[in-house]
Structure formats: structure tokens, C-alpha cells
């Protein structure tokens, strides 16, 4: 478990620095999964636009996110009117996934179709 959390924290910091390098104002909520209020992993802003990210780093073919994590991200999205993404680091790259592309089950949200995700470069072209 410790290795998983450390890997996730590294991915969060990596994405944070990538965004900052591109001129975004960024904030990382360390330990966001343990905080009692809904909190995304990263909040970023640029040119009056607000973005929130739930960051995952997994080498699996399918990404699973707890229902609680996704519900909190969606609550933040609704209340802040931010553009929300799940940022999945896999295969050495960040794939940014809009919540509408995740499949909902009883306990989890899942995602496996990388064709529906956008790469960080594409995110920058669209929003940066």
C-alpha cells in the first residue's frame, strides 16, 4: 500500500510541475483521499479557466476508481464549474479522461479505452 501511495504522490507532483511549466497556477491537495471534505488531487487555473484532476498511476489495462473518489470529483466539478479530468499515468504518459467516459459499476468507475482519453499535449493545445 505504501508503494502505491508513493507512486500516486509522484504522479501527482509530476503532473503539477508539468502544468506549472505551462503557465498554470497549481495547487496539490496532499493526502486528498484522507481529507474529510471532497478534494481533488490537483486544482489548476489559467486565463480564467479552472481545472481539477484526480490522478492515478497504474500499469493495468483497466483503471478502477472508487465510487467515493469520483463522486467527490463530480461534486467539485458541479460546485466550482471546473473542467474535471482523471489523469491516468500509464505507459509513461498521462492520459486525461473526462468523467463522462468512465463506466459506473456498483463500487467503482472504470476506464480502459485509451482512444477516448487525450494526451497532455492535446490538453495544452485545447486549454493552455
Image: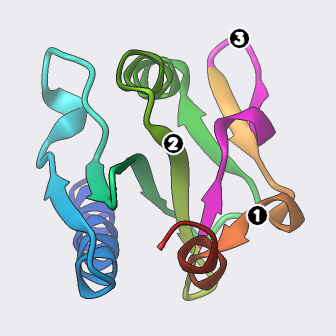
Image coordinates of residue 78 in percent, x first then y, are: 47, 18
54 or 128, nearer to the observer: 128
Estimate the spatial distance between the alpha carbons at disc 1 and disc 2, rounded to whole Å: 25 Å
**15 displayed left or right of 93:** left
Residue occupied by mark 2: 83
Q: Are marks 1 and 2 in contact (CB under 8 Å)?
A: no
Q: Position of residue 120 (x, y in %)?
A: 56, 78
Q: Estimate the spatial distance between the alpha carbons at disc 3 and disc 1, rounded to whole Å.
A: 20 Å
Q: Depth check: 82 or 113 in front?
A: 82
Circle 2 residues within 10 Å: few <14, some 14–19, many ≥20? some
Farthest-out residue, front? 47
Q: Quadrant of residue 105?
A: top right
Left or right of residue 36, residue 99 in this image: right
Magenta span of residues: 95-107
Q: Nearer the viewer, residue 107 or 122?
A: 122
Q: Is residue 99 magenta?
A: yes
Residue 127 magenta-drawn? no
Q: Say which label, 3 or 1, has the lower sequence index.
A: 1
Residue at point 63%, 70% (across, down): 126
Amino acid at each position: 500500500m505504501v508503494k502505491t501511495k508513493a507512486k500516486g504522490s509522484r504522479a501527482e507532483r509530476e503532473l503539477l510541475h508539468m502544468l506549472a511549466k505551462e503557465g498554470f497556477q497549481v495547487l496539490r491537495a496532499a493526502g486528498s483521499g484522507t481529507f474529510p471534505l471532497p478534494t481533488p488531487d490537483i486544482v489548476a487555473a489559467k486565463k480564467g479557466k479552472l481545472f481539477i484532476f484526480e490522478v492515478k498511476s497504474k500499469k493495468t489495462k483497466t483503471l478502477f476508481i472508487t465510487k467515493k473518489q469520483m463522486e467527490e470529483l463530480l461534486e467539485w466539478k458541479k460546485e466550482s464549474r471546473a473542467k474535471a479530468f482523471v489523469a491516468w499515468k500509464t505507459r509513461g504518459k498521462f492520459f486525461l479522461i473526462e468523467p463522462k467516459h468512465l463506466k459506473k459499476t456498483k463500487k467503482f468507475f472504470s476506464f480502459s479505452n485509451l482512444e477516448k482519453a487525450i494526451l497532455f499535449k492535446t490538453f495544452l493545445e485545447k486549454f493552455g
